[in-house]
């Protein structure tokens, strides 16, 4: 680690990071991030520590225009369905590329919640808890970052890419577990360059120590609790870290970048893969614009043109690099949309019976759970799955002891998740004997 | 969502721009909002503003004598009764300290208290100019004034337009939150500026509350109705959201859970919630704004049976406070603001306390999570009663709290463990150390970049930089939203923003406009130079050890490089916890 840091410091006066990257790209080593802990980056399959990628579809995606179409019915609208690589599973025709990757993942078509408001729904689907006036629960990513720490990591363990309301937060775990936000992924990370040369920077930091000393007197406890100094040290470590290269995609082959799509979300998904590769524990990539109260069908087509290539490229890329077995991928929004089509050709909020896609990290593949009424008469889906159980499943797969109770700042014990894992998605026996489950269960 | 972002980017106009300069800024700003907010464009449009600012500033520097401000007012309204209630608060606290076997820590330095006041009331730190005036008055007490200097400065700050602007925004958060809402029917900016005007005119709080609950009309013409339209969702008013918000904002309690089920450990029942929501049942969104339709009945869809049933308006306690006349909303408003409603005054006392300290009086719970009023009146009742007896005068309430002992004591203690510190803090024996809000931090950074007070009379440059940078800065620094008064630690994002961010660079860069070069140029000697840096950034003088350290640094450089040392020193001060936390 020492030599790592030393190298990073000296590079500030020598070739720039960009030079370094160009050189690496020229040698065809774009994947080999210079200076990165190679063992961590190269480790594959089950040896790898697990990570989480959440693809967050803000606004509430329509289940009928994504993973649970009901074509040719009263509620189906003009959306058509196509076959996929999972026998018997048909998804909306807006997702032709996902249709070729979905055998690696599972589809749940019967998530149920009682939160039909964007803010409250987002809270539930990001934390696994309904909003509670007495505390703020941590998001799934924050839990994973806190429960699976990695001291080799010099960049934040929990990162949110792209724009969306209510990004993932640390809640009662503390602001230090808030997602580190990158608004425009794939572009240079802002505020990473020190404004002056290293020697002058060192002088400034020494002066900061002098200034800090007098404040400390009589305020030790408050100062320690504030984490002020620690965040400065973390920021400095991050600024000089070679791991920062995980945020850059310039060195990735043009073809791969095109496959992800030249969109903010597409770039976000590619950066997410690089971050996970670098050892980041939890990444959220947000795509906003699913709140289609009017013009639902054209709206979802626009969204699909962004989501389909990015999601499919991500799964394919993770699989090809043998990272999918160590990375849970979860694609969802705050709720679904009404089976009924309103007068504006839109669909409204629908928390009772909506879909998500989840897989990786050693989960079984190709499983389809739950069923909604094709006529839209019955509000409740068959085989309803509470949001809590989805969370328990993901945490179980990530090897987080989710039954354990953490203590909130006001001293209240709180279980990480109150759900029970969905057995049908777990591949426990397979894991025990050390083999990797690859067959599709249709 | 694009709409929402664009809207929120227009939320906060930090000062009263009344002149054509505002139109100019707005023109630039709209062009920015319309297009994507890219850097090149910003630079391009900022250039003319910079040039104008430079000219104005150079003229300003040469013509104006910087230290020429009116002294603190000698007359505080009802100063005698104010002292009486401050004494009562003191006695009440002394009693509770005695019971707990605790004692408050020593008094804070007057400049420390001045900094707290400025952060709480103006959202920024005192300027060097203000510090000079304050110290002059401290050294030469004006004869004939019995009121202490800090109270006179509180009054002075309350009369400054910056108070209404800043406090209006802070209070607006409890009423309409931070979200942009549905732009077509909701104009948060209008609501905030309306609220600021009410504060500037020192309007009674109960009147303000009655207006926001019961006003009719368009969100543009009658800005108070934005309280209602902030809860419009999908074209209709969400009575449930509105009810939860009403009880939180005006009664300081959470009733939201009772929307779906009886509250597990509180007295609120689901029927209480529905009865209150029914008061909003006749509010109707029309083309001419919010109206009340007398024949409309409030219906609720049962969560299980999905059947609709009518709910009549009902209050959970003291139905005799509901007037017979008026619209349902107006009836609700009168019930909430009824002089016997302890919750109403307690809620405001707790909130104003929280805005002054950064922590609600009732520690450990959210500012809107008050329990039912206790049988034996507590300090909130004491403050609330004085508030009510003095026409719900917000300024008076602020005066009382700002003059109370907890606001005037140090944030240093001999606590060695978290438990010890918590015990002291929960009993208000020590001033809490609290992270500044993003708006306060950007306000402090901009103020530190100028020796003169930045207000509506400031250079176009200072105002432009705030106007353009505040939104981005607040977003990046982490807008904490509705739970802003809860405890927060520092984050890496914030450290990066302070250390390497554009704003830090811009305001530290030596230029004729920035304090760094002016300090370097105008200070008599090195020691004064260092002292000025400390006063400008931290509102205090350096300690001997600090002075020696930086003096030695300065001695090593030629005088023409002095500004570089000043820039470096200010960078270190900016990045100290002392700068970005209230204490």
Image (cartoon, rainbow, N blue to C red):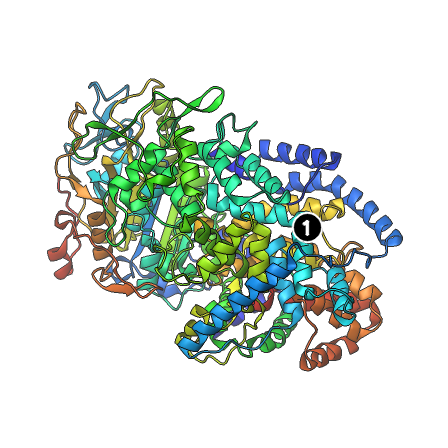
Q: Is residue B200 visible?
A: yes
- The residue located at (36%, 42%) in the rendering is B244
A269 to B120, vertically: above or below? above
Q: Quadrant of residue A145?
A: bottom left
Q: Nearer the viewer, residue B219 or A77?
A: B219
Q: Which residue is mark 1?
A: B159
Q: Nearer the viewer, residue B467 or A134?
A: A134
Residue A278 position within the rendered picture, expressed as x and y whole percent measured from the top left: 39, 58
On the picture, is B430 further left or further right than B139?
Answer: left
Seen as rendered, the residue at the extreme right is B63
On the picture, is B14 further left or further right than A385?
Answer: right
Residue B563 position within the rendered picture, expressed as x and y whole percent measured from the top left: 77, 65
For the C terminus of chain B, the image quarter is bottom right
Q: Quadrant of residue B367?
A: bottom left
For the N terminus of chain B, the image quarter is top left
Callout 1: SS: helix
Residue A209 position within the rendered picture, expressed as x and y whole percent measured from the top left: 59, 75
Q: Chain of mark 1?
A: B
- The residue located at (15%, 37%) in the rendering is A370
């Amino acid at each position: 680690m020492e030599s790592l840091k030393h190298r990073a410091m000296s590079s500030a006066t020598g070739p720039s990071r960009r030079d370094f990257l160009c050189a690496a790209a020229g040698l065809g080593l774009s994947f080999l991030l210079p200076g990165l802990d190679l063992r961590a980056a190269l480790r594959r399959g089950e040896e790898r520590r697990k990570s989480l990628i959440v693809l967050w579809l803000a606004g509430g995606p329509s289940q009928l225009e994504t993973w649970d179409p009901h074509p040719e019915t009263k509620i189906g609208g003009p959306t058509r369905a196509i076959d996929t690589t999972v026998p018997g599973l048909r998804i909306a025709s807006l997702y032709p590329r996902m249709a070729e990757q979905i055998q690696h993942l599972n589809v749940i078509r019967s998530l149920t919640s009682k939160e039909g408001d964007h803010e409250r729904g987002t809270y539930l689907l990001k934390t696994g808890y309904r909003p509670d006036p007495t505390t703020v629960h941590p998001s799934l990513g924050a839990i994973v970052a806190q429960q699976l720490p990695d001291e080799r990591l010099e960049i934040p363990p929990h990162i949110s890419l792209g724009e969306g309301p209510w990004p993932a937060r640390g809640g009662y775990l503390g602001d230090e577990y808030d997602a580190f936000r990158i608004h425009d992924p794939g572009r240079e990370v802002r505020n990473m360059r020190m404004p002056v040369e290293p020697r002058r920077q060192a002088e400034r930091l020494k002066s900061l120590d002098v200034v800090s000393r007098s404040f400390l007197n009589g305020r030790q406890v408050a100062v320690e609790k504030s984490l002020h100094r620690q965040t400065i040290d973390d920021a400095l470590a991050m600024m000089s870290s070679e791991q920062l290269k995980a945020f850059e995609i310039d060195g990735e082959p043009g073809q791969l970048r095109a496959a992800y799509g030249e969109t903010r979300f597409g770039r976000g998904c590619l950066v997410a893969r690089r971050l996970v590769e670098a050892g980041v524990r939890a990444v959220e990539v947000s795509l906003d614009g699913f709140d289609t109260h009017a013009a639902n069908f054209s709206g979802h087509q626009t969204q699909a043109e962004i989501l389909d290539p990015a999601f499919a490229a991500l799964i394919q890329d993770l699989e090809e690099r043998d990272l999918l077995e160590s990375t849970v991928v979860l694609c969802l929004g705050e709720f679904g949309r009404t089976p009924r089509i309103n007068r504006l050709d839109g669909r409204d909020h629908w928390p009772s019976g909506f879909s998500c896609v989840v897989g990786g990290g050693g989960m079984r593949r190709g499983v389809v759970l739950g069923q909604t009424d094709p006529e839209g008469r019955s509000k409740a889906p068959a085989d309803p799955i509470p949001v809590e159980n989805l969370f328990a499943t993901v945490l179980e797969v990530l090897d987080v002891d989710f039954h354990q109770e953490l203590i909130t700042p006001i001293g209240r014990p709180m279980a990480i998740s109150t759900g029970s894992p969905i057995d049908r998605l777990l591949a426990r026996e397979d894991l025990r004997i050390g083999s990797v489950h690859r067959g599709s269960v249709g | 969502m694009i709409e929402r972002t664009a809207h929120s980017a227009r939320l906060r106009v930090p000062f009263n721009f009344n002149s054509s300069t505002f139109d100019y800024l707005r023109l630039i700003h709209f062009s920015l909002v319309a297009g994507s907010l890219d850097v090149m464009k910003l630079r391009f449009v900022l250039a003319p503003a910079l040039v104008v600012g430079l000219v104005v500033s150079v003229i300003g520097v040469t013509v104006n004598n910087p230290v020429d401000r009116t002294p603190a007012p000698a007359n505080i309204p009802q100063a005698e009764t104010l002292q009486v209630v401050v004494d009562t608060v003191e006695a009440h606290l002394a009693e509770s300290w005695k019971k707990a076997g605790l004692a408050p820590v020593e008094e804070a330095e007057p400049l420390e208290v001045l900094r707290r006041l400025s952060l709480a009331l103006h959202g920024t730190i005192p300027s060097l100019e203000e510090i000079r005036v304050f110290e002059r008055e401290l050294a030469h007490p004006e004869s004939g004034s019995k009121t202490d200097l800090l109270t006179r400065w509180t009054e002075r700050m309350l009369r400054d337009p910056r108070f209404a602007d800043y406090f209006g925004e802070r209070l607006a958060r409890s009423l309409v939150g931070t979200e942009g809402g549905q732009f077509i029917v909701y104009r948060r900016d209008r609501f905030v500026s309306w609220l600021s005007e009410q504060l500037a005119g020192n309007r009674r709080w109960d009147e303000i509350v009655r207006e926001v609950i019961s006003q009719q009309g368009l969100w543009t013409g009658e800005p108070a109705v934005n309280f209602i339209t902030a809860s419009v969702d999908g074209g209709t008013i969400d009575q449930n959201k509105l009810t939860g918000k009403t009880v939180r904002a005006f009664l300081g309690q959470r009733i939201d859970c009772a929307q779906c089920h009886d509250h597990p450990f509180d007295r609120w029942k689901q029927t209480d919630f529905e009865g209150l929501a029914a008061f909003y049942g006749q509010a109707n969104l029309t083309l001419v704004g919010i109206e009340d339709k007398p024949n409309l009945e409030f219906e609720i869809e049962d969560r299980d049976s999905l059947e609709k049933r009518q709910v009549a308006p009902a209050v959970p306690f003291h139905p005799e406070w509901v007037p017979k006349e008026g619209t349902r909303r107006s009836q609700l408003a009168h019930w909430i603001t009824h002089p016997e409603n302890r919750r109403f005054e307690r809620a405001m006392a707790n909130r104003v306390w929280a805005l002054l300290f950064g922590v609600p009086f009732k520690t450990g719970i959210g500012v809107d999570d008050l329990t039912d009023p206790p049988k034996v009146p507590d300090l909130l009742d004491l403050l609330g009663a004085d508030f009510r007896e003095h026409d719900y005068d917000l300024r008076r309430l602020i005066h009382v709290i700002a003059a109370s002992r907890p606001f005037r004591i140090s944030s240093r203690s001999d606590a060695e463990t978290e438990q010890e510190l918590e015990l002291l803090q929960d009993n208000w024996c020590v001033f809490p150390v609290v992270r500044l809000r993003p708006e306060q931090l950007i306000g402090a950074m901009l103020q530190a970049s100028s020796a003169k007070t930045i207000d509506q009379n400031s250079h176009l440059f200072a105002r432009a930089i705030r106007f353009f940078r505040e939104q981005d800065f607040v977003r990046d620094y982490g807008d904490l939203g509705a739970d802003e008064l809860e405890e927060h630690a520092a984050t890496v994002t914030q450290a990066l923003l302070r250390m390497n961010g554009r704003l830090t660079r811009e305001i530290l860069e030596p230029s004729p406009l920035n304090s760094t070069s002016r300090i370097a140029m105008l200070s008599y000697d090195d020691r004064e130079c260092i002292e000025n840096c400390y006063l400008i950034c931290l509102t205090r003088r350096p300690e001997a050890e600090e002075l020696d350290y930086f003096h030695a640094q300065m001695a090593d450089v030629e005088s023409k490089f002095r500004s570089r040392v000043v820039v470096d020193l200010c960078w270190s001060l900016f990045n100290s916890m002392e700068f970005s936390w209230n204490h």
